[in-house]
Amino acid sequence: MTSNWFQGRPDIAAPSKPVEVVSIDRDTIFGAENYEAEDGLRDAVNTALLLDQPLLLTGEPGTGKTQLAEKLALELGLQLFKFETKSTSAAQDLFYTFDHVARFQAASVSKDEAALHALRFIDFGALGKAVVQSLSRDDAGKLFSEGQLPDWYRGPSRAVVLIDEIDKASSDFPNDALNEIERHYFRIREVSGGLEVKAAARQRPVVVITSNSEKQLPDAFLRRCIFYHLQPINLERLREITLRRLAALKVRSGPLLEDALQLFFDLREPKYDLRKRPSTAEFLGFVAALAGEPGAVPDQAMQPAHARRVLATLVKAPEDQAAAARHPKLADAA
């Protein structure tokens, strides 16, 4: 490879100063600025905006679901708040978490009611922040000690909220968050009597929800969303995306790119029976790595030795790599 910063040999001594590693600019190449939505997705986004409903995106991992929210926030000039769903996530986490330990510790050293007020121990989540940001500065200030607004508050304004991979959570998660997501409100139960925080009518959050379809979402939840499924990408569109995103790496049309495209689509076929089929994002990484190989010329065929050296960007399991090695465009490097 061109980039031989690491060689892993016992005769390599420590350098006198840190080695400068010149990586690709991932933010520029893979960032939201270069994202292009397909026609059907554009229509779904605009419908969700018109009807003020959450947009639910499904599709294989690596098809651009998460980046759609980033592009939407960029185009609308809105702040983006992300909620990365985990298997342990509860619906309340979307809005806030309460630090019970810190409050207990504070209560052990002070009896001052102001110092022990529940709002001092609140950490707002992605959707909670967006609801708070919709409020006027005066109303938002009431939710913080001494009215001191946090750095993330840029209101009153709308914000885009990404609830990423909602299917990772338990089946109770979407049901428990159903009404709050639809009506853009939540209740802080730890405040005496329960404090309801509701988004301002003209500044309600734009909500984008993604799912890899690992679990079936409840029908009641689906009824409240605008739905769009991202189909697996076709060859023409992937070629177009690759040329646009990797232009800075001097990737252009030619036999090298066509060979890489053929390899990608072949490995996704049942014939190779991969446990994890390569995604669009992984293909872009594969071609970007190929572009750094010495002798990787766009007007010439892809060299098996080059492809094998960077195959780990495309195929991510030992058994899958063994299966992929049977491909004619890789076999000569064995």
Image (spheres, rainbow, N blue to C red):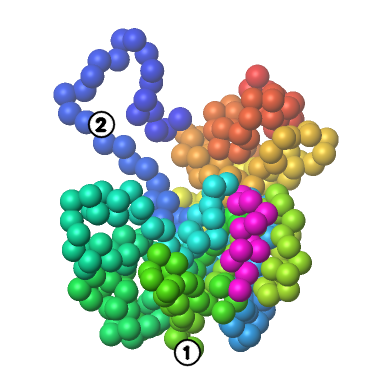
On the rendered structure, is 187 left or right of 51?
Answer: left
Q: Amino acid at mark 2?
A: Val
Q: Position of residue 237 (x, y in %)?
A: 67, 61
Q: Residue at position x 50%, y 54% from top?
A: 84
Q: Which residues are magenta?
A: 168-179
Q: Residue at position x 45%, y 30% from top?
A: 1
Q: Earlier in the sequence, mark 2 or mark 1?
A: 2
Q: Residue at position x 68%, y 60% from top?
A: 58
Q: Secondary structure at mark 1?
A: helix
Q: Foreground residue, 115 or 143? A: 115
| Residue on which disc 1 sits | 202
Q: Are marks 2 and 1 in contact (CB under 8 Å)?
A: no
Q: Position of residue 137 (x, y in %)?
A: 29, 83
| Count of picture labels | 2
Q: Residue furthest top?
A: 10
| Residue on which disc 2 sits | 19
In the rendered image, is residue 303 in sight? Answer: no
Q: Residues within 10 Å of mark 1 (few under 14, many from 20)?
A: few
Q: Foreground residue, 46 or 81? A: 81
In the image, residue 102 sits, relative to residue 278, either above or below, namely below
On the rendered structure, is 230 left or right of 22?
Answer: right
Q: Amino acid at mark 1?
A: Arg
